[in-house]
């Protein structure tokens, strides 16, 4: 059997979990960012990823990018989500690189060593944390001085995994909050635009239709999404309102400076 490469792993995630080519292209940002982080981080450093790998059959999606580092995955899934089980389980684990150096801790009791992490990643999780103050207290405690915090969040989402869906915070909101914890040197990136936002809402709307109608409309939307993705790439500027943008997702990276 052929050995699974990191490229194989990424292609599987993009096609079967994040649907970046045909439905949710804004999730490409998280892959671009994590590959950049993995190249910058040295092999002897400790990376902590605060995620929800129980939703994917207990697999940490991003651990393979840091194979030369001390990678610790912490599953911060809420109890109700754990009881429901995987909703997007990886069907064929022979197509991914499976890493299981993981722990389950409640978001408010992350039992890792103080000042132990060089990089903490929070990929697509913040909106499921009910008390962000307690959560950031945990992060500040675990992260080393001059350590890096990386957060990825979508901006437009339906209410999902109810009732454990709590916040939509802009990157500027996160920047304001994180400054109070001693974070500095912020870098903010965006992905997606108003056209794929329309497609995202259409995809949600189709799920409310009866099956026969949904099948017909899905064929139409599949073709339209190709056009909308191209339009996002071509038309990036709001021509009527200044200081206005319409991204679908963002990431924010910052350094912790402890006094």
Image: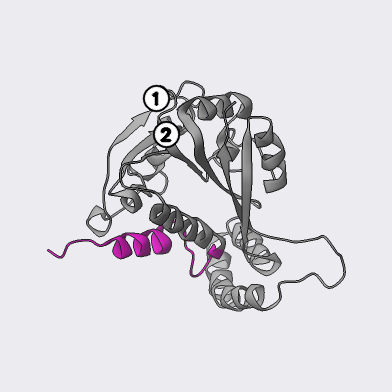
Do we see residue 51 in this rendering? no
SS class of the residue under badge 1? loop
Kindly indicate whether the residue at mark 2 contacts the one at mark 1 (C-beta within 8 angstroms): yes
Residue 201 magenta: no
Taking the spot 46% from the left edge, 28% from the top edge, the residue there is 142
Whichever of callouts 1 and 2 sits on the residue coming sooner in the sequence is 1
Front position in the image: 42 or 31: 42
Q: Is residue 161 left or right of residue 77?
A: right
Q: Which residue is mark 2?
A: 117
Residue at point 72% right, 61% down? Answer: 246
Most foreground residue, 90 or 47: 47
Q: Position of residue 3 (x, y in %)?
A: 17, 62
Residue drawn at 35 percent across, 44 percent down? 60
Taking the magenta stretch, the answer to whether it contains residue 2 is yes
- Please provide the residue range marked out in magenta: 1-25
Residue 99 rendering spot, x and y as whole percentages:
27, 44
* Residue 126 % position (x, y): 57, 39
The residue singled out by tag 1 in the image is: 112
Residue sticking out furthest to the left = 1
Whether residue 9 sits left or right of residue 233 in the image: it is: left
- Which class describes the residues within 10 Å of circle 2: few (<14), some (14-19), or many (20+)? many
Depicted 93 relative to depicted 82: above or below: below
* Residue 80: image tag: none
Using residue 112 as the reference point, say whether residue 203 is left or right of it. Answer: right
- Residue 82 rendering spot, x and y as whole percentages: 42, 32
Q: Secondary structure at mark 2?
A: strand
Q: How is the image coloured?
A: one colour
The N terminus sits in image quarter: bottom left
The residue mark sitting in front, 1 or 2, is 2
Tell how many labels: 2
Q: Residue at x 39, y 33 (%)?
A: 74
């Amino acid at each position: 059997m052929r050995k699974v490469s990191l490229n194989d792993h990424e292609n599987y995630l993009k096609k079967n979990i994040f649907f970046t080519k045909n439905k949710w292209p804004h999730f490409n940002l998280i892959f671009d960012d994590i590959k950049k982080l993995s190249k910058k981080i040295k092999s002897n450093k400790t990376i902590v990823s605060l995620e929800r790998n129980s939703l994917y059959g207990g697999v940490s999606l991003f651990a393979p990018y840091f194979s030369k580092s001390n990678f610790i995955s912490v599953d911060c899934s809420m109890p109700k989500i754990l009881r429901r089980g995987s909703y997007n389980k990886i069907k064929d684990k022979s197509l991914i690189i499976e890493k299981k150096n993981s722990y389950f801790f409640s978001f408010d009791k992350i039992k890792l060593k103080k000042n132990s992490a060089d990089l903490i990643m929070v990929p697509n999780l913040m909106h499921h944390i009910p008390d962000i103050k307690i959560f950031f207290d945990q992060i500040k405690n675990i992260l080393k001085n001059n350590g890096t915090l990386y957060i990825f969040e979508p901006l437009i989402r339906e209410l999902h995994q109810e009732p454990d869906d709590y916040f939509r915070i802009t990157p500027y909101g996160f920047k304001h909050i994180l400054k109070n914890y001693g974070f500095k040197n912020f870098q903010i990136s965006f992905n997606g635009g108003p056209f794929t936002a329309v497609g995202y809402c259409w995809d949600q709307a189709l799920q409310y239709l009866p099956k026969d109608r949904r099948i017909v409309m899905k064929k139409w939307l599949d073709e339209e999404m190709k056009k909308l993705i191209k339009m996002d790439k071509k038309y990036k500027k709001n021509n009527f309102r200044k200081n206005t943008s319409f991204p679908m997702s963002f990431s924010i990276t910052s350094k912790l400076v402890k006094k």
